[in-house]
Image (cartoon, helix red, strand yellow):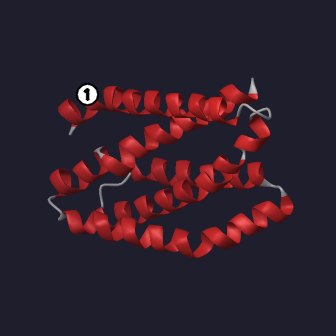
Amino acid sequence: MNTVLAWALFDLANTFFAVAILSFYFPLWIVEGHGAKELSFSVALGISMACVAVVMPFCGAVSDATGERMRFLRWTTYGCVTATLLLGMTSHLLTALVLFGIANFCYQLGTIFYDALLWRVAPPGRLGQISGVGAAFGYAGSMIGLLVLWPFVRWGG
């Protein structure tokens, strides 16, 4: 597969996750599905983001020193996918919030490795163009996320 296409497809999937889990459907599930306060989602989000803020500089430095961005991206992706998969298998609010925190932590941490790969993917002088392709795929991911998941929310609860 073309490396630019693979890089852009990752952006599509990342944005799909951001729409489905971070910004729209998961918070809706917490509040409407469980009758929880928005604060419970905000606390889980805040804790996971604080953890990212603490470890991100170290992870970025290790990534820069070793050049192992793909390996780190792979592991953060595995963590995010696994936590998200398990999230879909629980109806327990606290468990769901913990899994959400883990998924968000891995998602946010993975962005530093993903973003750093742009310089490997894009030929010199085409960084802006390739970055724009990734952004376009990201917008497509948000639309796909809304359209694909809407029937589940509307009719499935």
Q: Amino acid at mark 1?
A: Pro
In the image, residue 54 above or below residue 28: below
Q: Residue at x 38, y 70 (%)?
A: 46
Instruction: Determine the secondary structure under disc 1.
Output: helix
Q: Is residue 150 left or right of residue 118?
A: left
In the displayed image of the protein, which residue is found farthest to the front?
125
In the image, residue 154 above or below residue 43: above
**Nearer-the-camera pick, 27 or 113:** 113
Q: Which residue is mark 1?
A: 151
Q: Is residue 1 left or right of residue 18?
A: right
Q: Position of residue 68 (x, y in %)?
A: 81, 55
Q: Position of residue 145 (x, y in %)?
A: 38, 32
Instruction: Please tell me in which quadrant of the rendered image residue 127 appears.
Output: top right
In the displayed image of the protein, which residue is found farthest to the bottom?
54
Instruction: Please tell me in which quadrant of the rendered image residue 128 appears.
Output: top right
The crowd level at tag 1 (other Cα within 10 Å; few <14, some 14-19, many 20+) is: few
Q: Residue at x 61, y 54 (%)?
A: 110
In the displayed image of the protein, which residue is found farthest to the top?
1
